[in-house]
Amino acid sequence: MKKIILPFALFTVSFGIYSFRTQEPNGFKAAPLNANGPSGGQSGAPGEQNCTSCHSGSTQNGSAENLLILNNDLGMGMTQYTPGATYTVNLSMASNPAKKGFQVTALNGANAMAGNFIAGTNTQLKTATISGGQRKYATHKNTSNTAATQVWSWTWVAPATSEGAVTFYVATNKANNNNNDNGDLIYLSQHVFLNDDASLDESVKENNFNVGYSAEKDAVLISYATLSILPTSLNLVNLEGKSVFSKKLGATEVGNNQEWVSLPSHLPNGLYVVHFFVGNKAYSAPISLQR
């Protein structure tokens, strides 16, 4: 009788272990999926981890992959912020992989949370306590982690008073979509925005260049300052580096300049880079075209 019971008992235990192990498909742990966004503290900011805490991929320089644009209420991309003002943050991955994710926080020079985040329709917020202070994070949702979402958007309310330079720490995940936690590429980048009353040298004051897109006008608004009268032109380039629209514009005026440039209706939605020329000087900035 013992000879019969023992093998049966071993079979029962083995079957139970197998059943438990196969509750997760392909041996993939549920946590590293993070389809609905990772927990806070994964942006790569000081004192934090990044996406490699769950994904076994390697970190990459994300300066060219992570495209973060800070738009004011006119849709202009800003390089500086006004204390207390509200901005729309648009983040895209240049490669727009089939499966992807992100996490972003904004810190001042003391590595404390700068301002406040408000979630957008395709983003959500997470929090974490780092070095005794609470930070907020924008991240993807389980409905916005594929190439179908080209741009993640949320709101940043700038600090009520000047906190000097604010750095947005960005971590994105270019997932290989293999239903496992290995082989992904994690892109880390930092995007710095100065307070608009910060002390700037004369060359920066003269060339204070900003660009934005208005869906209502279907046009690009270019804002800059110059001390010279020079011819200007615009060249719009897609993310493949191909010129899709160019136009010669008028001459500059001494002082502050603003100009609307209408875009062709056939251009598809997506990210583009505006190259703007003042004489032989070139300025560049990304825009998000969303009609």
Image (spheres, grey):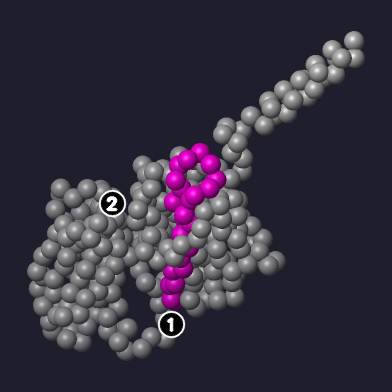
Query: Which mark lies nearer to you, 1 or 2?
Result: 2
The secondary structure that most of the magenta stretch takes on is: strand
Q: Is residue 47 above or below residue 56?
A: below
Residue most extreme to the bottom: 202
Instruction: Give the magenta part as a residue range.
Output: 170-195
Using the image as rendered, state which of residue 21 and residue 69 is in the foreground: 21
Instruction: Please state the horizontal and vertical placement of residue 186, each as a whole percent of the image.
Output: 48, 57
Residue at the spot x=15%, y=48% of the render?
A: 266
Cα gap from disc 1 to disc 2, whole angstroms: 33 Å
* Secondary structure under the numbered disc 1 in the rendered image: loop
Q: Is residue 150 above or below residue 83?
A: above
Residue most extreme to the front: 3
Task: Quadrant for the N terminus, please.
Answer: top right
The residue to which callout 1 is attached is 198
The residue to which callout 2 is attached is 270
Residue at the spot x=87%, y=14% of the render?
A: 3
Residue at the spot x=16%, y=80% of the render?
A: 280
